[in-house]
Image (tube, rainbow, N blue to C red):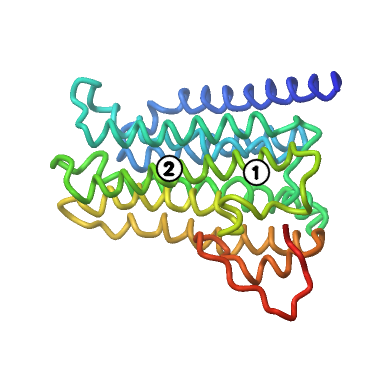
Amino acid sequence: MANQKGNKGLGLIICLLGYVVAGFMVWLIYDAVSIIHPILVVLVLDILATIIIFLFSVAFNNSSMYDPYWSLVPPIILCYWVFHDQSWTALTLLQVLILILVTGWSLRLTVNWVLRWKGLREEDWRYLAFRFKYRHNYWVVSFFGIHLFPTLVVFLGCLAVYPALVLHEGGMGPVEWFAAVVTLAGVVIETISDIQLSRYVNDKDKCDFLCSGLWKYSRHPNYFGEVLFWMGLFLFSSGAERLYWWIVPGPVIIILMFYTISIPMIDKRMLRRKTGYRDYLKRTSAMIPLKPKEKPASSITIIK
């Protein structure tokens, strides 16, 4: 146990070092790129930081070092867009609300990762599957699929709130308050889902898989909360004076990513590993919490 804790502590220190180095490199070249549009500044520096984290992943042979990037970067991006040309005293209620919601989401998700990650000895099972499937080409797949692709997805997700954060000159109207409710609901649902999952994992007398609480109504309620969060950010900009086409790809790609990549991968794995999961899959909504379908009378599979 002590050895495992030591490995986790060392892993977290190395991971932190990677992010510090990435931040330092971003700071070094900031002046050179600061003359371009703030959106492009973020895109260039975002990709640079991703490359640095990727190099650390390769050096320590663990792609999970990238995992906290998803939650750490959004508040940094949004803060840059807000504060590169204004101060705290000039913030509007809308800007404050968005920054609070995104920062709260970021802290919760990052802390959750820190608590769960066991150190350099542990790598996400999906990355291990890629290692087995792609073998000698794994690090090419890792860079484009595990590192760069999520970076661009998060960037587009953040871009969806740019009009509300920077271009919107109005106050909090019905659309903005509705967006705040949706965003907060996403954070709450994701938090409850993760708490229920954590209790299940630590329960010595647990059943074969989690199918109670929110997980009774959705096979992936945590993903539903995540999608709600990003949709909420998009809705903030839908009330702006002008609707920009480039705010649409972010939330659309995030929804498609969960429905076409994340959920199928997990369901396929659970079907192989867990007895009764096929019946659970047929009766339970993939993401949106819905009342479970009635179990056919001929079914003999029992799910507690």
User: Which kind of residue does numbered mark 1 sit on?
Assistant: Leu
Going from the N terminus, do you reach mark 1 or mark 2 first?
2
**Residue drawn at (13%, 42%) of the image:** 170
Q: In the depicted view, which residue is nearer to us: 102 or 50?
A: 102
**Residue drawn at (63%, 70%) of the image:** 283
| Residue carrying label 2 | 43
Specify the label residue 197 is tagged with: 1
Secondary element at image label 2: helix
Q: Position of residue 135 (x, y in %)?
A: 82, 54
Q: Residues within 10 Å of mark 2 (few under 14, many from 20)?
A: some
Q: Position of residue 264 (x, y in %)?
A: 65, 64
Q: In the depicted view, which residue is nearer to us: 201 or 226?
A: 201
**Left or right position of 205 against 157:** right
Secondary element at image label 1: helix
Specify the label residue 46 is tagged with: none
User: Which kind of residue does numbered mark 2 sit on?
Assistant: Leu
**Residue drawn at (29%, 60%) of the image:** 245
- Quadrant where the N terminus lies? top right
Q: Residues within 10 Å of mark 1 (few under 14, many from 20)?
A: many
- Quadrant where the C terminus lies? bottom right
Q: Position of residue 273 (x, y in %)?
A: 82, 59
Decide: is 70 above or below 84.
Answer: below
Quarter of the image for residue 243 reads: bottom left
**Residue drawn at (19%, 31%) of the image:** 92
- Tell me the CA gap for discs 1 and 2: 34 Å
